């Protein structure tokens, strides 16, 4: 496959009249990396991918492949593979002809086409399906044909826009594993768009969180989940409880803040006494006090909802600091809380995360 190319976006913007579909986006994708653009509908993911592909002309900024500006090049000169939502296979052409198409457009000699198509179909494990029509294949197989078609001409990188969103849940999960394994096998740079947070976390080397045309945070899945910078990222990537309060005292690497009359300790520096703070607390980092744990921060409440989900319990408790969502692994749990009963919840100062409000 092609050599590895790094792709950089340098202050890329796309304006539609007063609307900013992309607002000053800068990022670098390393050669061979699996980078995911994650954001809600309308956040600019497709516009960003289409700008990279060359189908959307940015209003400003530069796009560089291995340091060379490419924003003036038409799509076919960029040599990027693309896989879209809904595959867009030619229904009247065989699998082999579908995969051959990009090579035919490029005027590749016949014998070479036959070899490359065979190779690409073997890569996606469809070696025996060359003569079938797309409708004679399952959804997952059609998706693999689309992938073979995007890879057959040895592209510099592969762009994927919500390629799995038309598939049902189970097939989607299988294809996620498959795509990741293709990525590992061919080592090509993948830029992947999704609005599905679990998909982004499970597949990517790094994830860029988009909102209103801006990259809010970019990092490895664990960085983003464990250290979200803002309320939006903490909420968009997983679930979170939020506590807002005022810093009352500081001691070394931690501070105490008051929230609805109660004092809690929080790890992390910077915040001066008197400052307003917002703290994100993941449901799985809360514990039920009395299960053998004595966390530093504690709050009493009443169980409002309780459900058993097999691997975990999920409960909602009304407390002096609001309604808290709690997830407890089944194995760690003692007696089942009763709806309407008293409960004490707790967490340690390093279990919660100070975030910016946005
Ligand atoms: N051709 C266009 N003309 C006007 N506005 C557009 C056009 N394409 C996209 N937009 C707007 O740009 C924003 C980002 O769109 P898009 O990139 O499709 O988001 P996403 O893929 O994240 O759902 C949206 O507000 C959308 O309405
Ligand atoms: Mg889109």
Image (cartoon, helix red, strand yellow):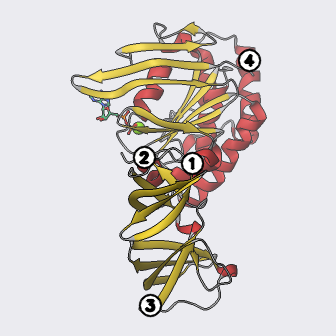
Q: Element at badge 4?
A: loop
Residue position for label 3: 339
User: Residue 200 placed where, x, y %?
Assistant: 57, 46
Q: Element at badge 3?
A: loop
Earlier residue among tags 2 and 1: 1
- Seen from the viewer's position, the closer of residues 321 and 42 is 321
Earlier residue among tags 1 and 3: 1
Residue position for label 1: 227
Earlier residue among tags 3 and 2: 3
Single out the mark in the foreground, 2 or 4. Answer: 2
Residue position for label 4: 3
Badges 2 and 1: C-beta atoms under 8 Å apart? no
Badges 3 and 4: C-beta atoms under 8 Å apart? no
Residue position for label 2: 356
User: Residue 184 placed where, x, y %?
Assistant: 75, 37
Residue 285 visible in image: yes
- Seen from the viewer's position, the closer of residues 247 and 298 is 247
């Amino acid at each position: 496959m092609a050599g590895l190319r790094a792709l950089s976006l340098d202050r890329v913007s796309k304006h539609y009249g007063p609307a900013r579909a992309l607002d000053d986006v800068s990022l670098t994708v390393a050669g061979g990396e699996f980078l995911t653009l994650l954001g809600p509908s309308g956040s600019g993911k497709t516009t960003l991918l289409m700008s990279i592909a060359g189908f959307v002309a940015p209003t400003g900024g530069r796009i560089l492949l291995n340091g060379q500006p490419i924003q003036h090049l038409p799509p076919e000169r960029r040599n990027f593979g693309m896989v879209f939502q809904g595959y867009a296979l030619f229904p009247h052409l065989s699998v082999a002809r579908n995969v051959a198409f990009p090579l035919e457009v490029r005027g590749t000699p016949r014998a070479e086409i036959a070899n490359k198509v065979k190779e690409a179909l073997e890569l996606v494990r469809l070696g025996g399906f060359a003569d079938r029509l797309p409708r004679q294949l399952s959804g997952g197989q059609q998706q693999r044909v689309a992938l073979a078609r995007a890879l057959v001409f040895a592209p510099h990188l592969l762009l994927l826009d919500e390629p799995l969103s038309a598939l049902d849940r189970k097939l989607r999960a299988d294809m996620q594993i498959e795509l990741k394994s293709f990525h590992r096998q061919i080592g090509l740079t993948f830029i992947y768009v999704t609005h599905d947070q679990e998909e982004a976390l499970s597949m990517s080397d790094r994830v860029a969180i988009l909102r209103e045309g801006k990259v809010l945070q970019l990092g490895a899945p664990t960085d983003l989940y464990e250290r979200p910078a803002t309320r939006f990222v903490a909420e968009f990537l997983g679930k979170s409880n939020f506590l807002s309060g005022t810093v009352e005292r500081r001691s070394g690497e931690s501070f105490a803040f008051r929230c609805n009359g109660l004092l809690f300790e929080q790890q992390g520096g910077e915040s001066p006494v008197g400052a307003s703070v917002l703290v994100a607390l993941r449901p799985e980092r809360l514990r039920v006090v009395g299960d053998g744990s004595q966390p530093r921060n504690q709050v009493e409440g009443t169980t409002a909802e309780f459900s058993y989900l097999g691997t975990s319990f999920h409960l909602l408790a009304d407390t002096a600091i609001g309604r808290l969502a709690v997830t407890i692994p089944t194995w760690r749990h003692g007696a089942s809380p009763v709806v309407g009963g008293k409960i004490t919840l707790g967490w340690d100062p390093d279990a919660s995360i100070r975030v910016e409000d946005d």
